Image: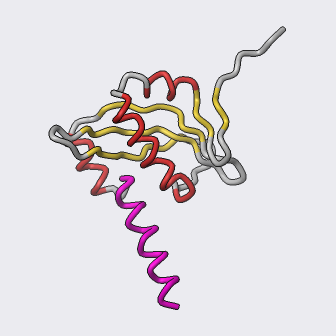
Amino acid sequence: MDLKQKYTEVDTYEIDDWFFAQLQSFDFSFAVVIIGQIVDVIEELPKLDGFTQRIFGVIKSKEPLFFAIEYLNQDGDIPILVDIERVDVDNYLDAILDNKTINQIENGIRKTKENRTED
């Protein structure tokens, strides 16, 4: 009996079929930007064993697109992108207050790199 593949594996993360299906509901140009944003921070996503988490992002355009990505990132495993959905600005603003945005992770990465170059 053949088993159906439930995710696509990439070097540093996995994409669940559901995530991929939901991503297809976005315009192609937005989908490319979303993947680019998450790939930039994937190694810095917080780890939590046994539970999925959400990270929020925004695509700045004439009409900003706010989105949330659900992922599983456990110690010893590579992250799995589980789901993606559009969210409203209020959810995104709440995520800023909770330090759960892609932009905040990117800023942390930049600060870390700047500190390394100063040493």
Residue located 42% across and 32% down the image = 84
**Which region of the structure is painted magenta?**
101-119
Q: How many marks?
A: 0
Residue that sits furthest to the front in the current view:
29
- The answer to whether residue 18 is left or right of residue 87 is right
Relative image position of residue 104 (x, y in whole percent):
36, 61
Residue located 41% across and 47% down the image = 55
Relative image position of residue 65 (x, y in whole percent):
25, 38
Residue that sits furthest to the top in the current view:
1
Up-down: is 35 above or below 113?
Answer: above
Up-down: is 113 above or below 105?
Answer: below
Provide the major secondary structure of the magenta segment. helix
- The answer to whether residue 102 is left or right of residue 2 is left
Q: Which residue is nearer to you in this view: 94 or 114? A: 114
Up-down: is 104 above or below 116?
Answer: above
Residue that sits furthest to the right in the current view:
1
Q: Is residue 80 magenta?
A: no
Residue that sits furthest to the left in the current view:
62
Q: Which residue is nearer to you in this view: 25 or 72? A: 25
Up-down: is 47 above or below 87?
Answer: below
Q: Which residue is nearer to you in this view: 72 or 105? A: 105
Residue located 28% across and 35% down the image = 87
Relative image position of residue 115 (x, y in whole percent):
47, 83
Quarter-wise, where is residue 81 in the image?
top right
Relative image position of residue 78 (x, y in whole percent):
66, 47
Q: Is residue 105 magenta?
A: yes
The quadrant the N terminus occupies is top right
Q: How is the image coloured?
A: secondary structure
